[in-house]
Image (cartoon, rainbow, N blue to C red):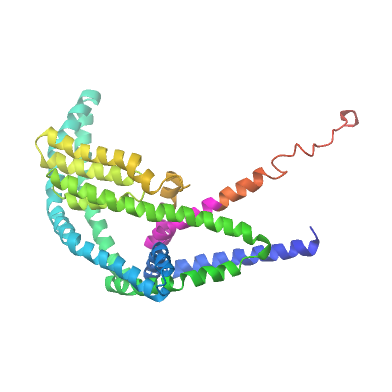
Amino acid sequence: MKPHTETSFTRQSLFWLAVTVAFIVLFWLLRGMLLPFVLGMALAYVSDPFADRLERVHVPRWLSSIIVLGVIVGLGILLLVLIVPAIVGQAIQLAEQAPVYVDELRHRVLPQVTKFVARVGGPSDAADVQKAAGAYVGSVSSWLFGMLSHIWSSGLAVANVMYVLVLTPLVAFYFLRDWDKMVHKLDGWMPLRHQAQLRGLAREIDEILAGFIRGQATVCLIMGVYYSIALSAAGLEFGVIIGTAAGVLSFIPYLGSISGLVASVGVAFFQFDSHLRVAIVAGVYILGHTVEGNVVTPWLVGNRVKLHPVWIIFALAAGGALFGFNGVLLAVPVAAVVGVLVRFALKEYLDSSFYDNRATPLPLVDRSEL
């Protein structure tokens, strides 16, 4: 490679590195007001295939954008009208029942733990465990309610609900209307020498995102409806709110099923005197997890998603820690991009002479001269 070519490549690399760092810093500084824009872009990305189908039947792009977003917003409003009153009612009831559950935990579970420790470690250890556990349960309950109160108040302070609800569809409309133009513009900015290669990477990223976001969102909806109906049919208090939360958390691998199982079995343990009723509630989650893992997810998501569950969990945790809720929303797309780039770099490395130098063996050294 010629010296001026190396200098040009170094300058370009430093330029794009500086642009990336500046974008990350700007995103971090503006993270408090970016929620409608991030949600609008995500909504436009999910809606783009439906708008493209309407365009194929000669519906103008602006009209197809209005139709698609109108249907999505209408379904969202209908869902909120049907579900939110039940969720709010159960949330209020849960807040009222929580002190009772904490008291039940202290009087029903703690004695059993104390007896077990007394058999293993002696009466003094049992007394210490009982004292520590009583203080721990009280501190955990106060911490939990304090955390929920902080999340609610900070959420209202960071992004006003009406501001998000009004601005998000507007941003989504403009993104969706001009989506193809923006993609075409970005395609025209690609370096001509590497255009085919970059297009292949972009297609792979789009395939992974489409498979995960659109497919997993459908999985979350199906599982949320199933858990809510099944738990309510089993007679469990707060079945709708627990089932809805489990469905939403199904976006994170295994977290929805595990958290929902723990919460529902815990509530069932305090609510029912019959072990059979508790077993039925546990069976709802075992059946749901089995069907989700063997039927629903393979059918809707398939093998297109090349994102390891641990990588998804790490990306969501890191995004939330660095950028809050906006970081959580962007965690999976960023993880998909990084995963594609890492696989591409690994493939280039495995195809390089640096990895496999058998075609150019190193010269033998005459040890007698050493």
Q: Nearer the viewer, residue 210 or 34?
A: 210
Point out the image quarter for the N terminus.
bottom right
For residue 170, side relative to residue 263 (left or right): right
> Is residue 88 in the magenta section?
no
Give residue 115's position: percent from left, percent from top.
17, 28
Q: Residue at x 65, y 48 (%)?
A: 348
Relative to 351, say whether 365 is above or below. Answer: above
Q: Nearer the viewer, residue 199 or 261?
A: 199
Corner quadrant of residue 42: bottom left
> Is residue 320 in the magenta section?
yes
Corner quadrant of residue 122: top left
Residue range of the region highlighted in magenta in the rendering: 316-340
Q: Nearer the viewer, residue 157 or 71?
A: 71
Relative to 339, say whether 284 is above or below. Answer: above
Give residue 140's position: percent from left, percent from top.
24, 48
Give residue 154's position: percent from left, percent from top.
30, 65
Point out the image quarter for the C terminus.
top right
Q: Label the magenta part by its dominant secondary structure.
A: helix
Single out the residue that lies furthest toward the top: 119
